[in-house]
Amino acid sequence: MDVGAPSINRRDGSVGGSAVFNGGDVRGKHRLLAELKRLEQETRFLEEEIEKLDKTTEASAVCKECV
């Protein structure tokens, strides 16, 4: 096995390797977790918007009331 080549950590299944690789791996995990959190927030926001839209009346019904 090469010294700098990634290896599988048997305890948690993560990929590891040299110190430089592991340092980048931690930053990569942080970026992925931050992106995941952002996507979860956006998903919640969109679900709330859909709920609001489901509760509103159709535009044609509102227009009929105005006329």
Image (cartoon, rainbow, N blue to C red):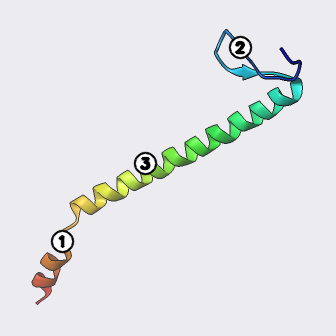
The residue most toward the front is 1
| 35 relative to 6 in the view: left or right | left
CA separation in Å, label 2 and label 3: 35 Å
- Extreme residue in the top direction: 11
Residue at (82, 23) in percent of width and height: 5
Question: Looking at the image, which residue is at 49% across and 44% down?
Answer: 40
The type of residue carrying mark 3 is Arg
* Image-based side of 60 in relation to 34, left or right: left
Residue wearing tag 2 = 9
Disc 1 marks which amino acid?
Glu
**Kind of residue at badge 2:** Asn
Return the x and y of residue 56 as percentages of the image width and height: 22, 65
User: Can you identify the residue that label 3 sits on?
Assistant: 44
Identify the residue at horizontal 50%, vertical 48% (top origin).
Answer: 41
Give the number of callouts.
3
- Placement of 31 over or under 4, stated as above or below: below
Q: Would you say 48 lies left or right of 33 here?
A: left
Upstream in sequence: badge 1 or badge 3: 3
User: Which residue is painted at 64% across and 16% down in the image?
Assistant: 13
Quadrant occupied by the C terminus: bottom left
Q: Examine the image and state in which quarter residue 37 appears.
A: top right
Q: Which residue is mark 1?
A: 58
